[in-house]
């Protein structure tokens, strides 16, 4: 993709990586091939595209990355373990790159939405979850928050006060507690 755009003389100033999916179920039982596909999409493709497009942005001293992770990035997620781990990767990678890019004129922002009304739940084969439905926001609201954060050069953007609180609390808790809470939410 990078090669073909370059050959056509297209300059990419902003790379938005939103593609991703989850899977619910025990790690040892869910479809292994689909699990690997998730890691390729959520982690590998994001990493490779970021690596491919950043050098030209840095050379032009403008532009940046807007990567979509999740509030899942802030704690382990029993029964969606691979998905949560992929999103932690996206968050940590984007934060690391953002710091490396200081002074280059290029930025990296990680949008971490909480529950959002999209096709995600159906695609992830998730069980009906009243807590999800009660707290979910529109995709438009989450996207606007991400766009605003990117324009301001913010590194991490969590739309919604409750989502921000939920992402912060695991840092205060003993390590075992967040995984117990997430286990309850995912079963
Ligand atoms: N919805 C939530 O509650 C929520 C919460 C936090 C974070 N997120 C994150 O938000 C991002 C967008 O998800 P969404 O909620 O909008 O779910 P969605 O409606 O299911 O959209 C998923 C997006 O990923 C693309 N995609 C899925 N599988 C793909 C594959 N194998 N190859 C290439 N593209 C693929 C889809 O493209 P096609 O439609 O063309 O297949 C679509 O654009 C994801 O990274 C997700 O992890 C979602």
Image (spheres, rainbow, N blue to C red):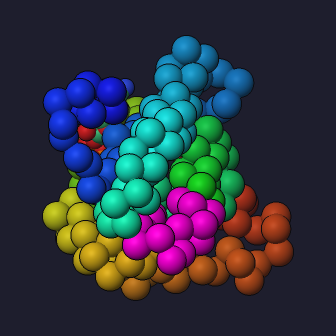
- Give the image quarter of residue 160: bottom left
Q: Which residue is drawn at 82% across and 64% down?
A: 176
Is 153 in the magenta?
no
Quarter holding the N terminus is top left
- 86 left or right, relative to 12: right
- 174 left or right, relative to 46: right
Residue at the extreme front of the image, as rendered: 59
In this view, the residue in front, 80 or 88, is 88
In percent of width and height, residue 184 lies at 62, 56
In percent of width and height, residue 76 lies at 68, 54
Q: What stretch is highlighted in magenta?
A: 94-114
Is 108 in the magenta?
yes
In this view, the residue in front, 105 or 138, is 105
Confirm whether residue 22 shows in the render: no
In percent of width and height, residue 28 lies at 71, 24
- Give the image quarter of residue 127: top left
In this view, the residue in front, 61 or 144, is 61
């Amino acid at each position: 993709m990078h090669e073909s755009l370059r050959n056509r003389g297209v300059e990419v100033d902003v790379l938005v990586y939103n593609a991703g999916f989850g899977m619910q179920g025990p790690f040892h039982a869910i479809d292994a091939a689909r699990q690997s596909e998730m890691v390729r999409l959520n982690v590998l493709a994001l990493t490779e595209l970021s690596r491919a497009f950043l050098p030209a942005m840095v050379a032009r001293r403008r532009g940046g990355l807007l990567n979509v992770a999740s509030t899942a990035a802030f704690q382990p997620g029993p029964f969606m373990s691979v998905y949560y781990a992929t999103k932690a990767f996206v968050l940590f990678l984007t934060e690391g790159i953002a710091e490396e890019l200081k002074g280059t004129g290029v930025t990296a922002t990680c949008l971490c939405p909480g529950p959002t009304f999209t096709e995600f739940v159906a695609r992830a084969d998730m069980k009906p979850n009243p807590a999800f439905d009660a707290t979910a926001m529109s995709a438009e609201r989450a996207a606007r928050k991400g766009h605003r954060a990117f324009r301001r050069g913010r590194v991490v953007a969590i739309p919604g006060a409750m989502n921000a609180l939920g992402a912060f609390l695991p840092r205060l808790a003993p390590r075992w507690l967040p995984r117990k809470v997430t286990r309850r939410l995912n079963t």
